[in-house]
Amino acid sequence: MKKFITIKHLILLSIMFTLQACGQSTKKNETTTKQTTMQNVIDKPGNPYYSNTDTKKLNVSNEEWKKILPPDLYAVAREADTERAFTGTMWNDESKGTYYCATCGYKLFEAEQKFTSSCGWPSFFEQDNKESITFKVDKSYGMSRTEALCGRCNSHLGHLFDDGPEPTGKRYCMNAISLDFVPYKDKVAATTKGNLQTIVLGGGCFWCVEAVYQNLMGVEKVVSGYAGGTVVNPSYEQVSTGRTGAAEVIEITYDPAKTNLDEIFEVFYTVHDPTTLNRQGADVGTQYRSAIFYKNDEEKKAAESIIAELNQKVYDGKIVTTLEKLDKFYGAESYHQNYYANNKSAGYCQMVIKPKLEKFEKVFKDRMKKK
């Protein structure tokens, strides 16, 4: 396999990098605006404003929307009408997928934010990000309610109430007609066209490792999550106890025509310390272990090869990275995804991740994505 970088780069980077602890917070209110990078997954040729990727706010008149939208959607979205309760199956459907604004295509919710309530309308306890839905006071019908509006096109979605489940206690009561639903299998198909490959790596704090790989040429997508252990679909709180056997990991989707396992593994060994057992800086526990979760013999052999080379030339036989057969990758909670991109002003991002990225760019500048 052709190598995009050489072991010399890795030796230099091992000298330059100062590895620091993750210092993660378990607070779920740190989520900020997320950038949707997937391709358009819904085709509405009659609606020129519809996009699953564009986040620019729209300023379209109702007169224009009336020409574009079906009458029933227009009545709800632009005239704040309310559909009948228990309409269709979306209110109690537990299918996994993503929910978009039916008017403009803006991403609003993920399946893990949905719950089945007795109200007869699709209900969610949390929105995708703080920009996806906006609010205003609604005093119609002699009541005082909080109206929920699409953050991109300002279309009526429903109302927000304070009688939802934990952890937010909120209930986003939505009109089903205002939502487009895309099952995850269709979303994956849209983002894995061509000969894309995936690899799952654990290198301590997934925020740090994610931020680096998002800048590597040839990497199409990076998802923070969990792998290994005995608990099915574990939560962050469960993994943080260190008793599940799961590790914080990232799943990298990459184009083998633009990068390869050699380069991905060499980058991996520059952004974490592979010589400390179950520990990265101040983060201690099996959840922070250095690990490569391989799917096949090719990935395993490539990992064994670079470990042997590094043990001989750099680490003198001290690498403790585990090679584990991948059973299942579980995506982490939404507030962990794109953490650096969404929280650049946060202290940890400024003090730890940003300097690490700057050092990374000095050596890998020819392999960085064009900004």
Image: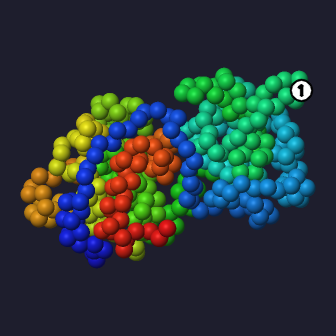
Q: Is residue 81 above or below residue 200?
A: above
> How many numbered marks does the figure carry?
1
For label 1, count other residues whose C-alpha is less than 10 Å away and answer few (under 14), some (14-19) or many (20+): few
Q: Quadrant of the N terminus?
A: bottom left
Q: Quadrant of residue 302?
A: bottom left
Q: Quadrant of residue 369?
A: bottom left
Give whichever of 16, 32 is nearer the camera: 16
* Residue 189 can be seen, yes or no: no
* Residue 57 picture location, percent across and down: 71, 54
**Which residue sits at x=77%, y=64%?**
48
**Which residue sits at x=17%, y=49%?**
275
Q: Is residue 226 above or below residue 214?
A: above
Q: Which residue is mark 1?
A: 141
* Residue 128 picture location, percent across and down: 60, 43
* Residue 262 picture location, percent across and down: 27, 67
**Which residue sits at x=24%, y=69%?**
9
Q: Is residue 53 above or below residue 339?
A: below
Q: Is residue 77 above or below residue 66?
A: above
**Which residue sits at x=84%, y=23%?**
143
Q: Amino acid at mark 1?
A: Tyr
